[in-house]
Amino acid sequence: MPSASAALLPAARVAVCGPASWNHLIVLDRLPEPVPHMQFALGDQHTLGGTSAGKVLHLAARGIDVALHALLGADDEGRWVSEALSAANVPLQAYDSQHTERHANLMTRAGERVSLYLSTPSSPTAADLDRIEAALSAAEIAVVDLSEMGAALVERRRAGAGGAPIWTDLHDYDGASSFHEPFLRAADVVFMNDDGTDDPWALMQGCIDRGPRLAVCTLGARGAIALSATGERAEVPAVPVEVVDTNGAGDAFFAGFLAASLAGADLAGSLAAGARQATVALASEHLHPAVAPVTPGRHSG
């Protein structure tokens, strides 16, 4: 597995920094009630996770020159993360961590999820941040995902550091979270879902008012919408698909939108490309089908 001491990767067109994890997915007929009881799992498997890993898998599949910068431990989970990304031809620059991030995700077939964090990465060193910042500066687009590492990088940007335009994924942002605020204010483009709001148009406008030129919100089975700083609006329905697993659908959408935007698509065309790419994740039991051949520990019912 690469480490921070290894030679850095060549500059990529899109540099992504943030979580890459090893996850245990447990499928249930319903999420557990908060009382002592017993349930039988419908199936479970161990597989690659992490919002940044999901994005690079789909960007690479779309032919985008991309590289992932992530904290990984010198443990089995870190090796499995590295092998899964390598199998998908995703360049990885790993930085030393005491542990690799791990989750246990309790899920239902309907896409409901409770994520339990079993381990989290160490704090990045100043030298690691310097290296990642240099990679982001050399890229055309810098994708900075929610994480302790990402928070340090956006604070550097807000303090005056230069670099490529930042695209960030706010996930279930509610319009008020203090953790999300620096990411929002440092970003050129922001993505989110509608889990934390009853009015996604107002949520996106609130984001635009803080500085980004574009806000995009996914609406699950209802599709996605976008709002630009110039007032342009666009929306697209979801693409029909037989859903196998909902993990990573938002990251796939992000990647499809970004790839189309880099190819010169307009706002509506980029939304449509994102909706199509989301089906690749939805139809797979992994973040992307490319990771399946090297995934150990699968037990499906």
Image (tube, rainbow, N blue to C red):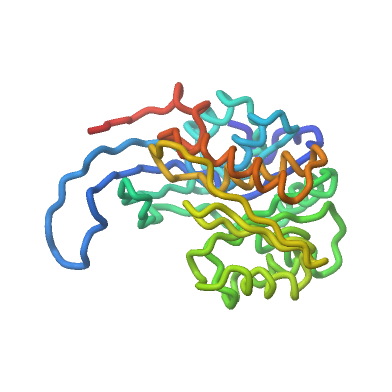
The residue drawn where x is 37% and y is 36% is: 46
Which quarter shows the N terminus? top right
Rendered position, 240 above or below 218: above
Picture coordinates of residue 299 (x, y %)? 27, 31
Give the side of residue 301 with respect to residue 218, left or right. left
In front here: 69 or 187?
187
Mark yes or no: residue 169 visible: yes
Looking at the rendered structure, the number of numbered marks drawn on it comes to 0
Occupied quadrant, residue 30:
bottom left
Tell me residue 94's x, y (percent): 63, 39
Please tell me which residue lies in front, 46 or 9.
46
Q: Is residue 75 visible?
A: no
Q: In front: 192, or 232?
A: 232
Residue plotted at (27% across, 32% down): 300
Residue 236 percent coordinates (x, y): 61, 51
Q: Position of residue 298 (x, y in %)?
A: 32, 30
- The image quadrant of residue 161 is bottom right
Name the residue: 61% across, 36% down: 58
- Please say if 160 is above or below 133: below
Q: In what quadrant of the picture does the C terminus appear?
A: top left
In this rendering, is residue 189 above or below 182? above
Which quadrant holds residue 67?
Answer: top right
The residue that appears at 40% across and 55% down in the rendered structure is 117
